[in-house]
Amino acid sequence: MSRTQSSGAPAPKRDELYATATAAFGRALDRLAAGYEADAEKRHDLRQDIHFQLWRSFEVFDGRCSLKTWTFRVAHNTAVSYVNRERRNNAGMVSLEEIERTQLDKDRRPDIDRQRTLQQLSQFIRQLKPLDRQIMISHLEDMDAATIAEITGLSPANVGMKIHRIKNILSNRFLEEKRYV
């Protein structure tokens, strides 16, 4: 069997595209995975899945969009599928770690520092609907509305409106959290 797949790019080209994408966007992909999964061990699995799906996807990459757009579209789609699969697998289950963490949080006064705020922000982002999460994570990666629109399939104006709305949602969640602390 030849190194060229019948319906896609030759394997060396796929490997080159993957290497280029991970060199350019690897750290952003790690942050993206953290935006979808809080647990370090599961986040590692998600990162592996993203990288595998990204590598596989380059078999059919035809260059109709930028490498950045392709990479983030594949990564977000993989992450959304992962989250949906995890949600189905863990429906109704609460881990002992979550129970302990909840009890510890009740026992101590929250310290308002940058790390805690960033953790809360990450938690709130993980609670968003998949499309809103994708938009906000991309926005936090300093992508402009046009790039996010290309990744999500929305119009740039719609992306801008959603970013504004999501920021309001997140701000309200922070305010509610402060009120109950």
Image (cartoon, helix red, strand yellow):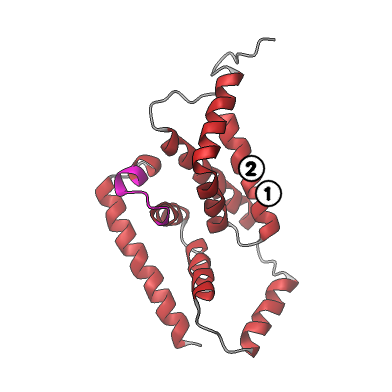
- Horizontal and vertical percent position of residue 69: 42, 38
Mark 1 Cα shell of 10 Å, populated few (<14), some (14-19), many (≥20): some
Q: Residue at x 62, y 89 (%)?
A: 108
Give the residue type at disc 2: Asp
Q: Is residue 89 visible?
A: no
Name above or below for residue 138 compared with residue 15.
below
For the point 51% across and 35% down, the residue is: 21
Left or right: residue 64 compared with residue 41: left
The residue range painted magenta reads 140-148
Instruction: Estimate how packed mark 2 is, as few (under 14), some (14 to 19) or many (20 or more) residues with alpha carbons within 10 Å.
Output: some
| Mark 1 and mark 2: Cα distance apart in space | 6 Å
Query: Mark 1 belongs to which amino acid?
Result: Asp
Q: Residue 122, percent across and down?
A: 51, 65
Q: Are marks 1 and 2 in contact (CB under 8 Å)?
A: yes
Secondary structure of the residue carrying tag 2 is helix
Residue name at image x 58 percent, y 89 percent? 109
Q: Which residue, given by chain and number where applicable, does mark 1 sit on?
A: 45
Question: Can see residue 84?
Answer: yes
**Nearer to me, 98 or 40:** 40
Look at the image and tell me in which quarter the N terminus lies: top right
Residue position marked by numbered label 2 in the rendering? 49
